[in-house]
Image: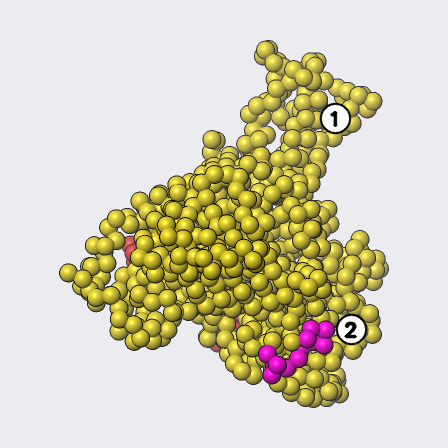
Chain colours: A yellow, B red
Amino acid sequence: MSATGIGAAVRRKEDFRFITGKGQYTDDVSRPGQSYIHFIRSPHAHAKIRSIDASAAKGMPGVLAILTGKELAADKIGNLICGWAITSKDGSPMKMSAHPAIANEKANHVGDAVAVVVAETLGQAKDAAEKVKIDYEVLPAVADPAQAQSAHAPQIHDVAPNNTIYQWHLGDQKAVEAAIKSANHVTRLDIINNRLVPNAIEPRAAIGDYDTGSDSFTLWNTSQNPHVARLVIAAFVGMAPEHKLRVIAPDVGGGFGSKIFIYPEEVVCLWASKKVGRPVKWVADRSEAFVTDAHGRDHVTHAEMAFDAEGKITALRAKTIANLGAYMSTFSSSVPTYLYATLLSGQYGIPNIYCEVDAVYTNTVPVDAYRGAGRPEATYVVERLVEAGAREMNLDPADLRKRNFIKSFPHQTPVIMAYDAGDYHASLKKAQELADVKGFGKRKRDSARNGKLRGMGYSTYIEACGIAPSQAVGSLGAGVGLWESAEVRVNPTGSVEILTGSHSHGQGHETTFAQLVSQRLGIPIENISIVHGDTDKVQFGMGTYGSRSGAVGMTAIVKALDKVEAKAKKVAAFMLEAAEGDIEFKDGKFTVAGTDKSAAWGDVALNAYIAHKFTGAELEPGLKEGAFYDPTNFTFPAGCHICEVEIDQETGNTEIVAWTAVDDFGTVINPMIVEGQVHGGIAQGVGQALYEGTVYDKEGQLVTGSYMDYAMPRADYLPSFKVDTTETKCPSNPLGIKGCGEAGAIAAPAAVMNAITDALGTEHIAMPATPATVWAALQKTQPRQAAE
Amino acid sequence: MSKVSMTVNGKAVTADADARTLLVQYLREGLRLTGTHVGCDTSQCGACVVHVDGKAVKACTMFAWEAEGKTVLTIEGLAQNGNLHPMQEAFRDNHGLQCGFCTPGMIMTAVDMVKRKGNNLDDKTIREELEGNICRCTGYHNIVKSIAAGAKAMA
């Protein structure tokens, strides 16, 4: 392994601009003549818009335009869409409502845009907005997904009776029913996977810039996938033909899924820029982000796990209500279906699984993928059932898991996924050693002596990522393919630019992708640039999410590098006057096999462009190759996280005293970056378990509407993490990469809650397990006595 | 529209600012120093931390006119003569950043922390002192490592 190749903890190339304040985030971009837009948003969760009177506001200082949904419709700007078609059990299509970028007749959630003001300064836009009079007819609202389908709930969209979007299922209902009936033991849990707000620290932003001269648009946007944004805004929203729309996603300050989707704001900025003839900039306030960024999770589940007399799991059944919010966001339909139910086998050989999912509309912010997207929900269901089952049957939770681990691969689950490779026992064993599980009993007694309850919880998770084989997802309703693209441009002076369809918003691609190229071509890492985020530079790509950029994005680069190497060998053959088949390439040098005749990378690159050593009839000049890589399978990272907590019985406060994570990500390109991804994922999972939770009141008002009320994890809420890996290479891509970006967020909530329920001796505690929640549970239970 | 003058990163500057212009807006829009970021609207996230007269301050919670005549240091002013500040180096060396958005605020808070608490900072102290800085990417583990290393290097 070289100092800058695969497996090296190379310090990040992109860091210089970030540590010196020279990053170029969307709000750092200023266009000449820039104007500012302020969105007027419904303060009501559900209301008819009777009238909008902008007369008092129009003449105010600096106002350039005041626009509503009526003008948007009149200009024939199309609606936003959900791009994944899910079919209900009865064969009917999902009930997708219209989603205009500015609400036209009805506002459907607090935060729904109802009008916009464009002005010379943001202050002037906000001042004018206060003078716009909107007459609402307030309607009853429903925020709770468990209530959305009841007869009393207000009807939100005519297209969806009982606010039901689809009623979907997966698995063998009859076989599961039979297994549960004949089970030796059945564990049952009612589980809420609490709604979260992703809260990337950079708020979403957009600059729309229409150029009259070329009748074309440029959009700067905080997007994880600028090409997808361009495609949707061109083809579905109809803003402009695709070739007349450039989308630039510059430095982006975190995404976690929330910046995948195509939102109203970028559509309106583009449209408004043409209407006022000036660039139009929007940056979300944080409290605005709370009511517009797609939220995550929000499942209500009844789950059952059946065991035989030996503790082998014979069946799993789950019925889930998934809240998709007021409108169907871009990928929303897929998250509680194909990204969730297909992981309900966990790491276990469960022969019978059946899952039903009802997706519902409520008068809340739209819900879509958020780090893990469906897999944290699945892992939580499976791992809580296993833990509770172990306690009910008086079995050691680790032993029960080991009894049920899948041990031979490939393994076809009953829920579509076929796991390709893994060794779950190895991760568990290593985690137990690192966590000193053997010493837990003593630590527990020590805690008890100090009046604290100590608990330990496992989460042996698996997930499907490296999203995704196009034909497979297409057959399941996806409107797009999920391949990735790469173009390798070798310059005459031998430096290399990689144009990738992936996007980096914290993942360090400028470094990790360069490591791959440096090792493969044997050239210094400083001579390699990674280019992403601009549809004028990179032809097309599907973006970064679903832990796909290593497995899919880097494999596309490998395929392009294969082509570059092949062509370079041809050039070298002419230079060295040898047969192409005799040319070997290693460590940046081309040699004629069995001789000491060689040519360095730089010389070959120059010769490719000078083209003096071969005729145009023999070989085309140049050294630039592209590739599209479509994965043949999902990848299946898996691992074991062990969380140890100490609970203060007086205050209900839970302190995480130790965290051990042993993950199998296959090949690791940069261990420093991979660990960072695990740390960040765990932090978000701990946030879900202990601190975060989006609260709506009965009127659909978002109570947790800012950082004042929504508890973001701070540094002193979290421990340091012990992180290690085991490795079974992914068999489906040449690098053997499984991916790592979401694993921490997938594993963590179950580990925390299993530790807390272990300490308390009760299953009846919900996330977030705040001090108040834990304290209340303590009053109801007999905590295990401080022993000896 | 009136003008507000102060010293920023060692240079005397003047820019337009009205009564409600925040210091962070003055820096970002008036002076085009966009390294100081805005991440929230309730003064919690710390992405806007700068130093005013030698103390860490949230630039989103101060009006520009309040800084009239004062000395302001932003992230852009930390590196001297093309050399990175040891705290900046420490963040790069210890992978203390991922998306980079909270990073300027983290670094400015860290430098102030060392001034007040010394060069030998333990985990607990660092984590408590980071109460006013939120990061969503790193889980803080490497930020704490970076600050401990930067503190030592600043000695």
The picture places residue A496, in percent across and down from the top left corner, at 64, 36
User: Is residue A303 in view from this perspective?
Assistant: yes
**Local crowd size for mark 2, using a 10 Å CA cut-off: few (<14), some (14–19), many (≥20):** many
Looking at the image, is A608 positioned above or below residue A378?
above
Q: Which residue is mark 2?
A: A72
* Residue depicted at 56% across the width and 58% down the height: A174
Q: Which residue is mark 1?
A: A610
The picture places residue A79, in percent across and down from the top left corner, at 75, 68
The picture places residue A238, in percent across and down from the top left corner, at 80, 63
Q: Find the residue positioned furthest to the top.
A: A595
- Depth check: A27 or A630 in front? A630
Q: Is residue A329 magenta?
A: no
Disc 1 is placed on an element classified as helix
**Local crowd size for mark 1, using a 10 Å CA cut-off: few (<14), some (14–19), many (≥20):** few
Q: Is residue A155 magenta?
A: yes
**Front: mark 1 or 2:** 2
Q: Are marks 1 and 2 in contact (CB under 8 Å)?
A: no
**Amino acid at circle 2:** Leu
Disc 2 is placed on an element classified as helix
* Residue depicted at 70% across the width and 14% down the height: A579
* Residue depicted at 77% across the width and 59% down the height: A234
* Residue depicted at 65% across the width and 24% down the height: A603
Q: Is residue A443 left or right of residue A774?
A: left
Looking at the image, is A761 positioned above or below residue A695?
above
- Depth check: A630 or A530 in front? A630
The disc numbered 2 marks a residue on which chain?
A: A
Q: Which residues are magenta?
A: A150-161
